[in-house]
């Protein structure tokens, strides 16, 4: 039994890491102290009881993602940690500006490489890195998109080093997921921890659906009065199906599967009880490869035959555009500070994590010589797969990584071990520091809007730096304090 | 207000089947409850096997390698997920439809279905025995009724609602005919007074199974005959589970779809409804019984399958035309389209 009156923070020690809920948080004007007091007043036992009830709610509400192993499919909840993560108004100003800047650079880059290729001609980026990239789509060349926006929905993974400085770890410019948890986590907190939130002035997060729908309406083909927006999902067996449902509901648009749509005369239609109905903007949550079996993978049953043709004719808009994967590639990532400077004549507001590119001799040599100090990542993977954390790897694991890198150097990058910031997290042994990151979401039609906060993912295992939901990561509600 | 987006054909189809499968869950529980009350010493196996016959599950049951005793039949309908007519299979199918419908159904509907699903799929062997069985059936009925109530109070009434109601009504009418058929399969020849009383007790059981015993008592003569029960279940105009009332409601819902939403594809289904009504009212019930109640019920079930087919052909995305045998189970289960 824990003593309910005991201070849950008494045994909390964040060690050398930047703590998001430290009593002396720079820029904080009392919110941290307020939350720490409220948590102490609630006490560990109550925290646990309410957290358990909240997780049970998630199961009953089916706010789950599906994990597929060889034989089974299991619906899992994203473990929810009830201790919020706080961002001050000042921190958010920096993050918001940095994310907008990054999205602007990504869109400018995509426009350039699919049109004039100036950045390559000016030798800022090696040509083969762009045109040899598996995610480069020749179909996009010279194809205009409205407002020059390719990446309508962008998620940027950001971490904090020991000094508390934000650094970008990864761009997600294809079909980033997780935004549903941002909104659902807030709902959950409001239900289960009203006393923790009382008196706090937080930036709301429930505007996402409206903003997204607005952007998707903006990008519809010109001349359409009331564009029909739909969300295209692979269906109920997709691990992110809940999020698709969430977004369709928040936007008030139909959630369709490939077979609900068809193309006739280069126009996209959906099958309704009243006959065929025109579709103008498709927020697609399926990858480029599966979109159109007549253009990409012929074996795809998820897509819509002819949809790329309709798109090229300008009769339907796709979000995100095809071919954005070339911009969020881990190899291109290394060049992002230069890309930002090239197009915007500005320094990156949010710096990168230092990155060594194994396709370059210097980068490869350095990486192989320092394997035990570096984090090595395959450039084509997502979800945290294939990562080796040098300082924590066994001899065998390091040798395995070496073999993979030597075999195909251009598939690898490496980065120094960065220490992610921590925040108090409820564990079996009380409040303990756990590492976390942040994924803000940016929505771009004509302009860019950033959802205040974003998804805070937390590695629930002690010492772990892997926050991905597919590997046991959880999430926290992210509070952006209102200005003034 | 911007113009109203029409209903995705797949949603209409899933709503239709969501309602059908849940109605089936409830009615399987009703059938089992009634069967248990018919169980008489020495003839349990026979009573329980009649359940297999009225569901036309003889082949499936035999293939499962089960023996026709009471426990095996109960397991077949309450635990066996491979039996498409079982409670867990119907519940699983209902939840799968609900999952595809999450963008259109209310959160409260989804949450209750999700929890009910978990409850039904964790039913244990021991719950099928003794007095526990009746309580289990009661819980199943209550679970579906809870769904019905939540739906009534929270489900948005656009055209999807009408497809949902059509699914429920077709399944309900079909299930009432099966409840009637139970009695047919146990029919004993006219006998002495003692047997006549026993028989009336059994008809009372059928009425209780359909939740119509007290309503029947209010409208039937005190010395009722079996024909009065048959007439009540087939053609009463006020009893919510009578076939005629269900048919009248089907007509109303189809008409709403046609008048309010301009769905002209409802016309063949409306004609089919007319035919079913004519068949019900054509002959007095004594004549129906004399001519053979079982055959009459068979024909009624076939008509209901064809009615579902008219709706599916006109409106559903994945509807596949019926196989050459319309009396096969083809119209009773959803077409499963395998997609990648």
Image (cartoon, grey):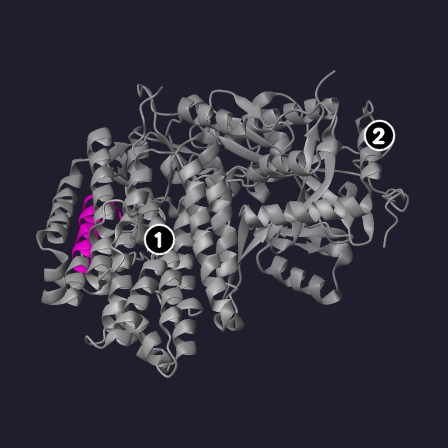
At x 34%, y 28%, the residue is A228
User: Mark 1 = which residue?
Assistant: B214
The residue stretch that appears in magenta: B301-319
Q: CA distance from mark 1 to mark 2?
A: 65 Å
Q: Nearer the viewer, mark 1 or mark 2?
A: 1
Residue B317 falls inside the magenta stretch: yes
Question: Mark 2 packing: few (<14 Cα in 10 Å), some, or many (20+)?
Answer: some
Looking at the rendered structure, the secondary structure element under dot 1 is helix
**Residue count near mark 1 (Cα–Cα under 10 Å), binned few <14, some 14–19, many ≥20:** few
Q: Is residue A179 left or right of residue A152?
A: right
Residue at image coords 40%, 78%:
B70
Q: Nearer the viewer, residue A191 or A238?
A: A191
Q: In this image, B97 relative to A402: left or right? A: left
Disc 2 secondary structure class: helix
What chain does mark 2 sit on?
Answer: A
How many marks can you see? 2
Residue B268, given in percent of the width and then of the height, sits at 13, 44
Residue A394's place in the image compared with B283, above or below, is: below
> Mark 2 highlights which residue?
A33
**Residue A154 image label:** none
| Quadrant in the picture for the C terminus of chain B | bottom left
Please give the name of the residue rendered at 86% of the width and 51% of the height, measured from the top-left corner. Answer: A2
> Which image quarter holds the N terminus of chain B?
top left
**Residue name at image x 59 percent, y 30 percent:** A339
Q: Is residue A320 visible?
A: no
Q: Position of residue B196 (x, y in %)?
A: 25, 71
């Amino acid at each position: 039994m824990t003593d309910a009156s005991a201070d849950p923070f008494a045994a909390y020690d964040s060690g050398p890491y930047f703590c998001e809920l430290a009593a002396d948080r720079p820029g904080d004007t009392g919110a941290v102290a307020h939350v720490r007091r409220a948590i102490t007043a609630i006490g560990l036992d109550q925290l646990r009881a309410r957290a358990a009830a909240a997780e049970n709610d998630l199961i009953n509400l089916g706010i789950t993602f599906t994990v597929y192993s060889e034989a089974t499919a299991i619906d899992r909840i994203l473990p929810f940690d009830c201790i919020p993560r706080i961002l001050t108004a000042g921190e958010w100003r920096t993050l918001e500006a940095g994310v907008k800047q990054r999205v602007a650079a990504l869109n400018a880059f995509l426009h350039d490489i699919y049109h004039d290729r100036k950045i390559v001609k000016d030798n800022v980026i090696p040509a083969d890195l762009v045109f040899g990239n598996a995610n480069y789509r020749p179909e996009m060349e010279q194809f205009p998109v409205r407002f020059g926006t390719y990446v309508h929905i962008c998620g940027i993974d950001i971490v904090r080093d020991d000094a508390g400085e934000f650094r970008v770890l990864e761009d997600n410019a294809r079909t980033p997921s997780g935004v549903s948890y941002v909104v659902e986590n807030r709902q959950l907190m409001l239900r289960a921890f009203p006393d923790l939130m009382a008196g706090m002035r937080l930036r709301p997060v429930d505007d996402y659906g409206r903003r997204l729908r607005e952007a998707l309406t903006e990008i519809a083909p010109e001349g359409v009065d009331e564009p029909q927006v739909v969300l295209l999902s692979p269906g109920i067996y997709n691990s992110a199906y809940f999020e698709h449902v969430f977004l369709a509901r928040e936007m008030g648009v139909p959630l369709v599967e490939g077979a609900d749509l068809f193309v006739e005369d280069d126009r996209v239609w959906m099958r309704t009880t009243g006959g065929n109905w025109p579709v103008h903007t498709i927020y697609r949550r399926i990858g480029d490869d599966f979109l159109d079996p007549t253009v990409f993978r012929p074996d795809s049953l998820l897509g819509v035959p002819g949809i790329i043709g309709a798109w090229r004719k300008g009769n339907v808009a796709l979000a995100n555009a095809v071919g954005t994967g070339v911009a969020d590639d881990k190899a291109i990532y290394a060049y992002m500070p230069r890309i930002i400077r090239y197009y915007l004549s500005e320094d990156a507001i949010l710096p990168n994590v230092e990155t060594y590119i194994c396709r370059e001799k210097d980068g490869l040599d350095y990486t192989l010589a320092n394997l035990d100090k570096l984090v090595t990542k395959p450039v084509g993977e997502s979800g945290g797969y294939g990562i080796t954390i040098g300082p924590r790897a066994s001899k065998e694991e390091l040798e395995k990584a070496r073999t993979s890198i030597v075999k195909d150097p251009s598939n690898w990058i490496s980065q120094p071990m960065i220490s992610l910031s921590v925040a108090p997290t409820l564990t079996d042994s009380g409040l303990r520091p756990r590492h976390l990151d942040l994924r803000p979401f940016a929505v771009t039609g004509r302009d860019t809007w950033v959802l205040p906060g974003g998804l805070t993912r937390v590695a629930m295992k002690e010492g772990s730096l892997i926050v991905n939901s597919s590997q046991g990561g959880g999430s926290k509600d992210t509070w952006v304090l209102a200005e003034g | 207000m911007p113009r109203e987006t029409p209903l995705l054909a797949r949603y209409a189809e899933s709503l239709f089947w969501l309602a059908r499968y849940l109605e089936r869950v409830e009615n399987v529980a009703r059938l089992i409850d009634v069967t248990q009350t018919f169980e008489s010493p020495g003839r349990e196996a026979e009573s329980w096997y009649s359940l297999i016959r009225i569901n036309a599950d003889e082949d499936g049951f035999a293939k499962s390698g089960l023996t026709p005793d009471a426990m095996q039949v109960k397991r077949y309908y309450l635990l066996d997920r491979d039996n498409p007519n079982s409670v867990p299979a119907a519940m699983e199918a209902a939840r799968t439809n609900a999952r595809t419908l999450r963008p259109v159904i209310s959160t409260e509907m989804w949450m209750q279905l999700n929890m009910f699903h978990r409850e039904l799929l964790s039913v244990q062997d021991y719950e099928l025995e003794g007095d526990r069985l009746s309580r289990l059936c009661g819980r199943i009925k209550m679970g579906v009724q809870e769904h019905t109530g939540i739906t009534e109070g929270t489900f948005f009434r656009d055209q999807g609602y009408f497809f949902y109601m059509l699914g429920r009504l077709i399944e309900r009418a079909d299930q009432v005919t099966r409840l009637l058929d139970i009695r047919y399969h146990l029919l004993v020849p006219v006998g002495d007074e003692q047997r006549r009383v026993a028989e009336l007790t059994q008809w009372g059981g059928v009425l209780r199974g359909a939740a119509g015993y007290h309503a029947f008592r209010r409208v039937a003569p005190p010395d009722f005959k079996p024909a009065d029960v048959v007439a009540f279940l087939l053609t009463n105009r006020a009893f919510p589970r009578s076939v005629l009332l269900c048919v009248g409601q089907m007509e109303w819902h189809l008409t709403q779809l046609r008048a309010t939403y301009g769905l002209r594809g409802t016309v063949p289904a409306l004609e089919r409804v007319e035919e079913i009504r004519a068949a019900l009212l054509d002959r007095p019930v004594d004549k129906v019984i004399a001519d053979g109640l079982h055959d009459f019920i068979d024909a009624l079930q076939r008509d209901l399958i064809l009615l579902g087919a008219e709706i599916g052909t006109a409106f559903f995305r994945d509807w596949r035309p019926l196989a050459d045998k319309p009396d096969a189970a083809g119209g009773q289960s959803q077409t499963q389209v395998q997609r990648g």
